Image: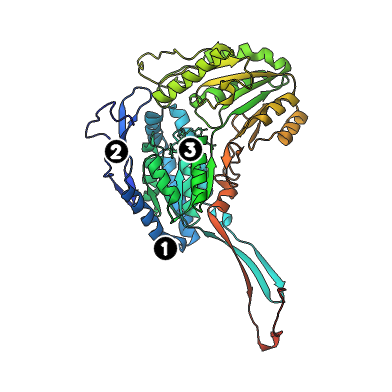
Amino acid sequence: MNSALRHPSPSIRTAKLLIDGKFIDSKSAHWQDIINPATQEVVGRVPMATAEEVEAAIASAHHAFDKWRRTPIGTRARVMLKFQELVRNNIKRIAHTLTTEQGKTLADAEGDIFRGLEVVEHACAIGTLQLGEFAENVATDVDTFTMRQPIGVCVGITPFNFPAMIPLWMFPMAIVCGNTFVLKPSEQDPLSTMELVELALEAGVPPGVLNVVHGGRNVVDALCTHSAIKAISFVGSTHVGTHVYELGSKHGKRVQSMMGAKNHAVVLPDAPREQTINALIGAAFGAAGQRCMAASVVVLVGKAQEWLPDFVKKAKSLTVGSGDQPNTDVGPVVSTRARDRIVGLINAGVSEGATLDLDGRNVLVNGFEQGNFVGPTIFSDVEPDMTIYREEIFGPVAVVVNVDSLDDAISLINKNPMGNGVAIFTRSGAAARRFQSDIDVGQVGINVPIPVPVPYFSFTGSRGSKLGDLGPYGKQVVQFYTQTKTVTARWFDDEDSNAGVNMTIALR
Ligand code: NAD
């Protein structure tokens, strides 16, 4: 906890709890500062909610469920229609808060909100998304149909890197399906998330349907083990995601955990050179590399290895600075701890023998000398057993691996335990088709560096990047947030249709 760093003035913004439709100040004795990563200024404070507050949030959601699940689909959809309008109208304001507490550039902060807004737009289509199935005459006068019913109180636990998009992956779809929700935002940047939550209430989400508690492990563990909780969506690091998955599953919850990554971008020599390098630069260094779908490993195949100097030159041209400055390409990383960790991994790359082609460790930004900056960093001659290849760096660091053929690239990637995203750059349809078929990674980009699907599809990270069968948003999350009930029904027309006693299991 970094509350000892500064003493914020009493007027400083606090992250409220939302319990039963009311925004309240926590009674907790444990608070954490929310720090602007470009300046180290304290921009707010966040409480570690007490056990009683967590209990009250769950009780409120539990109580609200019975009425909300009976609320007509159209009413629920119209709340989302209003919510999407409010989010759209407030993007710039929320983006400003997001940049202040998270560090990413204003343009990227707007992108963070917009990708979440797309999920809210999709939630408006719940009328067709939540349809059941119907089969007439499965036996004489017997029909069978399914209903997709909400499951109860659901929980969302979100990471720092997308404080708008990832909460918006979760609560809109959960509540539009008729569930109630307890959200636990990242304690590092909860203020922008709370601005979205305020708009959800303004849009008409009734008291108790959406609740928010803040905190760390104690709060998360209380949510994962509470008997009233039916499902948990987690997005964050692999070690916490595994813990949440195991604890929640042990306590009978449905759990989806979207976790860490190591995403490869394969470059074939026939790819369009300029576009490919531009795409790699954006995907490796955008958001200071703090994206779960960042292209952090560049795999140069054959003659594409000659492109390394161009890649380095372009990376050098990026401007590192505060996210609120108009010319900034790469903002600060979220905390001094994150920066120290990234610098430690760069040091490991050097000591393990990789070639450091571009070193971002000592970057200085005029006027923002206290910021957590790491400049774009590139390693080549990287081997799969090096720490910088094995670990998710989660900073603006690209590691370049050389291979001889597409086969070698596929084999390298399929041996990596992570499976969030992958991309290939080529002009060859045949090579791309082979890649999409043989690569064992859940989300594939073809000349698209960050293939995060739009919400008519689902987020389908795989293998070590995911636990649980069903991913966030799209059709899969409707399955995740609902229980299928199947009804088999016979209506007797008159006495004549009585076929007597049926002692078998056959329907007749
Ligand atoms: P994190 O795991 O530190 O935190 C995620 C959430 O878990 C936060 O709400 C946090 O308060 C809580 N938490 C932290 N420590 C905990 C503990 N010991 N016990 C219980 N809960 C705890 O992750 P982060 O640093 O905020 O986010 C970055 C990570 O998230 C990266 O690994 C990134 O790849 C991953 N991520 C994955 C996806 C995906 O879709 N696969 C998307 C975004 C981010």
- Please tell me which of labels 2 and 1 falls first in the chain: 2
Q: Which residue is mark 3?
A: 240
Q: Secondary structure at mark 2?
A: loop
Q: Which residue is mark 2?
A: 30
Horizontal side of 304 relative to 322 (left or right) equals: right
Density class for disc 2 (Cα within 10 Å; few <14, some 14-19, many ≥20) is: some
Residue sitting at 47 percent across and 56 percent down?
A: 179
x then y, percent, for residue 134: 65, 65
Q: Give the CA separation, mark 1 to mark 3.
A: 34 Å
* Name of the residue lying farthest toward the left: 10
- Please tell me which of labels 3 and 2 falls first in the chain: 2
Q: Is residue 191 visible?
A: yes
Q: Is residue 266 above or below residue 67?
A: above
Q: Give the CA separation, mark 3 to mark 2.
A: 21 Å
Q: Secondary structure at mark 3?
A: helix
Density class for disc 3 (Cα within 10 Å; few <14, some 14-19, many ≥20) is: some
Horizontal side of 265 relative to 162 (left or right) equals: right
The amino acid pointed to by label 3 is Val
Q: Is residue 447 visible?
A: no
Q: Secondary structure at mark 1?
A: helix
- Please tell me which of labels 1 and 3 falls first in the chain: 1
Quarter of the image for the C terminus: give it.
Answer: bottom right
x then y, percent, for residue 455: 57, 44
Q: Which residue is mark 1?
A: 67
Horizontal side of 365 relative to 130 (left or right) equals: left
The amino acid pointed to by label 1 is Lys
* CB of mark 3 near ligand 1 (< 8 Å): yes
The amino acid pointed to by label 2 is His
